[in-house]
Image (cartoon, coloured by chain):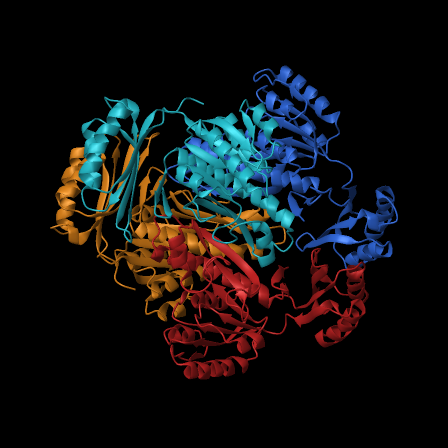
Chain colours: A orange, B blue, C cyan, D red
């Protein structure tokens, strides 16, 4: 695979008004910027404007820091309350993956990384069980085993402290809860806000919490699903990035549902992570815009 | 379209044990019955056996009443607690449709009936608004307008009594709530149990109750759906017959979700109704087996 | 339903270069234009740039003719070879529908028009059989019966001439072949280029031509589909606007496939027509960009 | 995961007539067989009857060889031309996987095997490139590198001979062409008939042969797909086991289509392989019945 062309990515949100597109486009055009991809969205209910622009790095006469500085001026000009970011696809994304016993999401992500489809550094995999150490190490990735004792509040607190340290040392662009099964404490949710992605094994808001396939089987639904969302202190209630479903029938046992659901969990998590790392997800309130 | 071959349909459920298939199959074989379609299912959790058999009517030396009598003996032989039915596709199905203002489900059903795809008699359409009278009458079907006064309990009770009378005079195989928008009182749910089908405009159990698309928009889901279920006294909680979903995005307003959702409501209701009328839906507890 | 806000829609395509977005956005911003929706796409293989902009009509100090004149200047400035259009959502769209015996697509479109979901004038329905006259007239729409004699070239030529006259008198924005089943002669394809939409009852390019469900059944496929495309002189080979599929199984007869496929044909045609009438479909070569 | 209950699986096909179900069911009932799953299908066009029965091994007073012998008598009794098989889920399935450079299908299968979801022995992986040796060996599975020289007929013939030897020594239940990219010679197709499964990266019959995503991109389709089918001497034309699709848009480059398509290839192959190994696929002519 040839190295993809280096690009700068601008994401920007502000209260809607006329002239925003013109201002940003003129700024980029004046600097010679070659826009490779551009997307706009206006939320009329909230009166909020969103945009994402991808510019060829080599079309600009300056680097990402200068672009950031100059775009900051534009942003300030466009409003007092804005939400923006300028990133460089040349900076390699770092990802830390949290796992438990279930291997399918980890396997899937490692496969995508190994093939080059997902072009990131997996800095570490951290498990509250040790079972996925071997496959992790076979990919040359460090694995840390951090047990979370079930009925020992202090022990759990210590485990979360260790987890935080193991994650934060990499300053990752994404902390992926790949069926991690431990509820993060509020302060970790806050610190990793907008960077921690969870895959929940149901079509939210159906079947929040534990054993969603059991809940689904009991309710007799005809489709099961999975949801990739940002982690917030409110369990399974963070902004949704991606969802998908698969058909089940009366012939499917809970075990069959679990098996079929896994295939959905894998792709939903992989899509959500890709979009997150490509700065395609803009969060506003509890909703996401996916460009 | 040639008239479909006349068939007798047997549905049967009982506690699972060995020899049930053999007993039923031998009974049919001994009588010369040509089985056109046969389906079996065992629910290991509940220890319950389900089957549905379609037999060519002209392959048996007797009619449906005699088949019902003889199969009754088999059923009694197979257990004290059984749940069975023998029906004749030669008996034309009667359907009563309840509507409000939204036309899409009614239009869809009328189109299927007019083309012969859904080979039933629509005995009547009953609306709590009069807007769908014209399209109903254009199909030669009686339309009854029964207003349901919002804040008048006695008036509502009288309206439900009138509704019941208008429905029951046709002794319909199905009472279809095609976006009817009125919650049936418990006694009607009981009397029409297993015959009243509702289309709910969400993927249940997500977004029970009123304005599900508004709820979905607020939660920021990436798919919206629809659910066809039997009506029970517990709102939107009856046995699910069919569900489906369609993708939405941040670009979709509530109005867009409503519009996209309609296409799902129509097909989900049409599928559910077809299966119900073909005796393909076996209810056990709050779950359905769809053969 | 409240009347939707009146908008002007600009679609534009030209060889890609820097500064296009800025030029168009500045032009609109300088005129005070409030952009409600904006989409961009660059096809790197063909080096072609596409955009579609929706502007609130009441935000501009002039009307659609003046906008068209002024935007024409911009377009000429941006290149010698461009492809653009400026339309006014205030101008009601006119549609002529061509049918044969199959009713499902016509029914579906009439239902959408009757409910206001599809806010267009159906100027006429023209059938090579008369069977759909009643349902058409029940909606207050003129129906014309133009028989196409099978083995009579001159008779067919006369029929096509009559068809053309009946269509062209309305100068429709869309000529919809809603399972019309007659192959249009090349000169009609040319005259109606970019306005004639067909629904083909297969997932193209699989099963071109006659009886695609029979072909699909013979091949043993596990999904059947439908394709909405612009009509060109090359049978079933025009630019694809929309496609979708539905699952089938060994248990489905050809008749079942036909029935299931209809539900896909209806929605695929309805989506394609909506996008066409909203100027969301930009054709380039044999491909479409759907904004 | 607890070891699944051991079962005997009977598949049977013959010209349709009355009494087949009764004969088989009575035979099993008389022997005390506990039928866990039973499925029937009649193809009215071909007048062919199909069934699959799963019986609890511990419910029968004899083993699989005796069952096979006894069922053979029943089969002969039921017709001169029958097609049947009796297998034992207690016999571990052996699979040989053929690969080239693309890793996604192999990774996916190895992950399913490692987690126990796919409870089989992967006897060997054989690649015409060596790139997937490491991940194979990390799972404790032998990897053989057999290069196929492109423009050297004799060299290729020798390579196929070596391939055959490496495969046949394991007498595998399935030979999986997991994006193998080499066309098998007719004699290998014949020898492995009904055991060699291919994943083709298009929705067949669209885009037979090389570079289907390039073909799909050129045609401008709105969905891309994948097809798992039995390998026959006729390229990409064997009986289809499973297919699925994923939506693409004008915004997707060929590279994006390849990436999205991979997720479909993986699940379609995994489903097809599972059904094959569970004896759920009955082939008749060029079609499959999936029980």
Seen in the picture, residue B126 relative to C11 is either above or below; the reply is above
Q: Is residue B203 visible?
A: no
Location of residue D212 by image quarter: bottom left
Identity of the residue drawn at 31% across and 53% down: A174
Seen in the picture, residue C34 relative to A196 is either above or below; the reply is above
Q: Quadrant of the N terminus of chain C?
A: top left
Q: Residue furthest front?
A: C154
Identity of the residue drawn at 64% across and 36% down: B115
Q: How far from the left and from the top, in percent, is residue D285?
A: 63, 64
Seen in the picture, residue A78 relative to D146 is either above or below; the reply is above
- Quick one: C6 or C284, which is closer to the camera? C284
Location of residue B172 by image quarter: top right
- Quick one: A60 or B203, which is closer to the camera? A60
- Quick one: C264 or A235, which is closer to the camera? C264
Q: How far from the left and from the top, in percent, is residue B238?
A: 62, 38
Location of residue B187 by image quarter: top right
Q: Is residue B59 left or right of residue C77?
A: right
Q: Is residue C203 visible?
A: yes
Q: Is residue B67 left or right of residue B272?
A: right
């Amino acid at each position: 695979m040839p190295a993809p062309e280096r690009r700068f990515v601008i994401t920007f949100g502000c209260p809607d008004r006329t002239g925003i597109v013109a201002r940003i486009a003129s700024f980029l055009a004046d600097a010679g910027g070659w826009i490779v991809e551009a997307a706009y969205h206006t939320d009329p209910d909230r009166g909020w404007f969103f945009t994402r622009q991808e510019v060829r790095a080599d079309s600009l006469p300056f680097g990402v820091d200068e672009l950031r500085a100059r775009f900051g001026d534009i942003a300030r000009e466009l409003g007092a309350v804005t939400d923006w970011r300028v990133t460089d696809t040349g900076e390699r994304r770092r990802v830390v993956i949290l796992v438990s016993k279930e291997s399918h999401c980890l396997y899937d992500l490692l496969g995508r990384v190994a093939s080059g489809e997902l072009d990131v550094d997996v800095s570490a995999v951290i498990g509250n069980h040790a079972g996925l150490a071997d496959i992790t190490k076979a990919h040359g990735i460090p694995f840390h085993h951090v047990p979370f004792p079930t009925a020992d509040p202090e022990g759990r607190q210590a485990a979360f402290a260790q987890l935080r340290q193991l994650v934060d040392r990499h300053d990752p662009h994404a902390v992926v809860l790949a069926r991690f099964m431990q509820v993060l404490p509020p302060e970790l949710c806050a610190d990793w806000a907008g960077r921690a992605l969870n895959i929940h094994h149901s079509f939210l808001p159906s079947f929040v919490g534990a054993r969603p396939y059991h809940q689904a089987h009991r309710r007799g639904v005809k489709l099961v699903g999975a949801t990739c969302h940002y982690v917030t202190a409110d369990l399974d209630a963070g902004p949704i990035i991606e969802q998908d479903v698969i058909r089940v029938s009366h012939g499917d046992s809970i075990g069959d549902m679990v098996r079929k659901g896994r295939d959905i969990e894998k792709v939903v998590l992989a899509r959500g992570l890709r979009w997150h790392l490509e700065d395609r997800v803009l969060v506003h309130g509890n909703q996401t815009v996916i460009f």
